[in-house]
Amino acid sequence: MRSKGTKTIAENRKARHDYFVLESYEAGIELVGTEVKSIRQGGVNLKDAWCSIDKGEIFVRGMHISPYEKGNIFNRDPMRVRKLLMHKREINKLYGTLKQEGLSLIPLSLYFKDSKVKVQLGLCKGKKLYDKRDDAAKRDANREIDRNMKIRNQ
């Protein structure tokens, strides 16, 4: 019997720092057996990953999946381009949005959903430097407020 539910494998924290996430989508990913085993061990990095749409198909680039230690000849290139699995209608909608509004498609997280590996994609707009500073200032202000409330409630 397989386990139900979701288990997060990796998150792209840099994406939330560098981009505003407008929408998110779920996609399957085409993997080889040794890649899945490596992912189960936590050998994946989404830091510089991004997605592109070519000829009606969507691909993730820059995602690093470490080679499986016991995989020998069956291991693939860790940085290879991997195909994502989405409905054609969704891909066409995303393609139109990306071209019109100049947005980016960034993988936000990788997770298991009922023993299948899924990727959460974010339709993102790049942040400017002042946006990043503003977010940092808000985060610091909220921390200070929480700290003061904790002291006051003691």
Image (cartoon, rainbow, N blue to C red):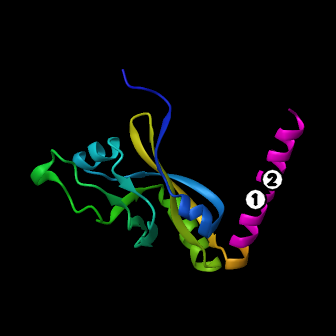
x, y percentage for residue 14? 54, 63
* 152 or 105: nearer the viewer: 152
Furthest-right residue in this view: 152
Which residue appears at 38% of the width and 68% of the height? Answer: 61
Looking at the image, residue 55 sits to the left or right of residue 107; the answer is left
Q: Amino acid at mark 2?
A: Glu
Which residue appears at 41% of the width and 73% of the height? Answer: 54
Quadrant housing residue 23: bottom right
Q: Residue 9: within the magenta?
A: no
Furthest-top residue in this view: 1
Reading the image, the residue beneath label 2 is 144
Work out which quarter of the rendered image holds the N terminus and state it. top left
Spatial separation of the CA atoms under disc 1 and disc 2: 6 Å
Q: Which mark is residue 140?
A: 1
Q: Residue 147: within the magenta?
A: yes
Crowding around mark 2 (Cα neighbors within 10 Å: few <14, some 14 to 19, many 20+) is few
x, y percentage for residue 34? 22, 47
* 63 or 24: nearer the viewer: 63
**Magenta stretch, residue numbers:** 132-154
**Of helix, strand and loop, which one carries label 1?**
helix
**Of helix, strand and loop, which one carries label 2?**
helix
x, y percentage for residue 152? 89, 39
x, y percentage for residue 6? 50, 36
- Labels in figure, total: 2
Dots 1, 2 in contact, CB < 8 A: yes
